[in-house]
Image (cartoon, rainbow, N blue to C red):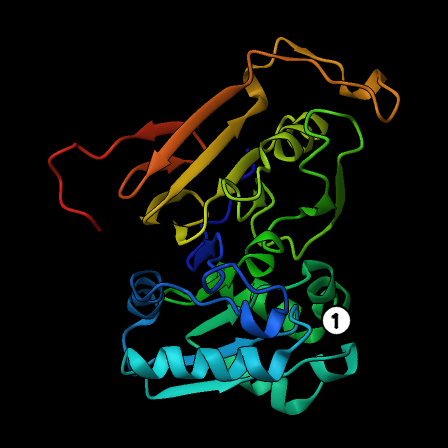
Amino acid sequence: MKIMQKIKGTLIPIGGNEDKGIEESEIYTLEFIDDGILFHVVEAAGGVDANIVVIPTASSIPVEVGENYLTAFSTLGCKHVEVLDIRSKEDSETEHAIELIKNADCVMLSGGDQSKITDKIGGTTIHSILIERYKNDEGFVIAGTSAGAMVMANEMIAGGSASESFIKGAVNMYKGLGLIPELIIDTHFIRRGRFGRQSEAVAKFPNLIGFGLAEDTGMIIRNGNECTVIGSGMVIVFDGSTLTHNNEKILKEGTPMTMANLTIHVLSNGDEYNIKTRKVKVLPIEAPFI
């Protein structure tokens, strides 16, 4: 019998939380993560003395996003935060980048375009180091917001229309970094109405579990299995293993889909989910907010 390696690191995918959400220009809609979420990131990485590396590769304005995170982490009292500005695969192979990732306690991937992360980091030396450290280093944390969360999966949502929900072809898939291949992760889930595209993603890969993360909401995933919800919103879990009818494979693009007996869980702060058993543990209603 093949014994599965126990994952020692921690993943923290976050649903994103744009600043007020009213400005059209990205410079005014930076990914401001609520202090409560970032507090959990810092705590998981070992506290304010942790070495934190911010990678704003997904963003079209990486300098501004990097500065935003420097300010946010400094506000929490963090003393060792550095921005690693990767804009090409060559940047991922520099000695400076490799040393930063080797010595980091936490790597934070920003929001933006998740395909930029896979194109510029996927298959490089630092990608290999991230996977190796996540598997083997106790206390090592990889956190990501929005695009930075979605890229953690192997089957990654790269885009898709919310207005064409439940129509085949509404979701575009791409290969992510493969940190947690059991999941498909979507973000800004409630505000942007992404229920349909996550449903299609799970219909394409019914053996995988879909996580739809609301803004200002995240999952702390320990040992590659044990998940705890943090933040003010909800996580919608899609379990396709119970499907009794799924016509995704036989449909032409643009055709409405049928999915019967798809299992959906709506989880909030403090609730837990076990990836291996696909079981939910709900926080008692009288328990304090995490």
Q: Pick the quarter of the image with the N terminus.
A: top right
**Residue 101 in view, yes or no:** no
Q: Could you tell me which residue is drawn at 68 percent across and 47 percent down? A: 156
**Number of dots carrying numbers:** 1
Q: Could you tell me which residue is drawn at 45 percent across and 78 percent down? A: 69
Q: Position of residue 252 (x, y in %)?
A: 88, 21
Task: Give the residue at the far left of this rendering.
Answer: 286
Quarter of image, res 131: bottom right
- For label 1, the residue is 120
Q: Is residue 164 left or right of residue 33?
A: right
**Is 90 placed above or below 39 here?**
below
Q: Position of residue 268 (x, y in %)?
A: 32, 39
**Residue 47 in view, yes or no:** yes
Residue neighbourhood size for the residue with mark 1, other residues' Cα within 10 Å, grouped as few (<14), some (14–19), many (≥20): some
Q: What secondary structure is marked by label 1?
A: helix
Q: Is residue 201 left or right of residue 218?
A: right
**Is 28 placed above or below 205 here?**
below
**Is 247 placed above or below 76 here?**
above
Task: Give the residue at the far right of this rendering.
Answer: 252
Task: Give the residue at the far bottom of this rendering.
Answer: 96
Quarter of image, res 242: top right
Three-letter amino acid code at disc 1? Answer: Lys
Q: Could you tell me which residue is drawn at 69 percent across and 66 percent down? A: 117
Q: Position of residue 62 (x, y in %)?
A: 62, 79
Looking at the picture, tell me which residue is in the foreground, 272 or 290: 290
Q: Could you tell me which residue is drawn at 32 percent across and 64 percent down? A: 44
**Is 79 placed above or below 256 here?**
below
Q: Position of residue 196 (x, y in %)?
A: 63, 30
